[in-house]
Amino acid sequence: MVSVEPDALDGLAAQLLGLAADLAAEADECTRAVGLLRSAAVGDLAAATATAGSAWSQVLGCLAQHDAAFSSALYAVAAEYRAADAALAQDIGGSPTTEAAGPR
């Protein structure tokens, strides 16, 4: 049996969305830092540090996008569950607002 708590899913989705925003900001900061790395170093070291900074920025950006997508999916699952729960309650003659709170 699967137990679903839509409010808990919403809470997790909100946390993931916040994390996605933080990661996106860090990716932007890394992108800006690449220019500083290039100017602070010379030769092969400059190229290596710029490459590493760019790669790290891309990793953070990718994580941010995936966190945001997963957050959206969790919000959608919670909404679908609420809709299914309301439909089921209506089918059996009850009201989802009069039901006891908690997982189902």
Image (cartoon, helix red, strand yellow):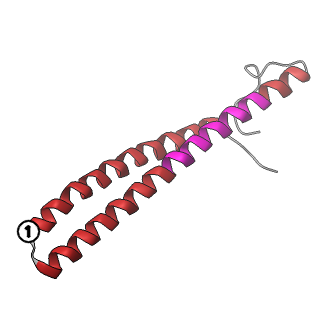
In-image side of 56 versus 97 (left or right): left
**Which residue is more in the foreground, 54 or 90?**
54
The amino acid sitting under disc 1 is Ala
**Which residue is more in the foreground, 96 or 48?**
48
**Which residue is more in the foreground, 77 or 86?**
77
Residue at image location 90% in from the left, 18% down from the top: 93
In the picture, residue 88 is in which quadrant? top right
Residue 92 shows in the view? yes
Whole-percent x and y of residue 37?
15, 66
Residue 8 shows in the view? no
Residue at image location 90% in from the left, 22% down from the top: 91
**How many C-alpha atoms fall within 10 Å of the one at disc 1: few (<14), some, or many (≥20)?**
few
Q: Magenta includes 83?
A: yes
Whole-percent x and y of residue 6?
65, 36
Q: Secondary structure at mark 1?
A: helix
Q: Magenta includes 40?
A: no
Q: Which residue is mark 1?
A: 40
Q: Is residue 33 above or below residue 17?
A: below
Q: Is residue 25 above or below residue 48?
A: above
Residue at image location 15% in from the left, 74% down from the top: 46
Whole-percent x and y of residue 62?
44, 57
In-image side of 49 versus 43 (left or right): right
Where does the magenta region start and end? 67-84
**Which residue is more in the foreground, 10 or 49?**
49
In-image side of 34 versus 100 (left or right): left
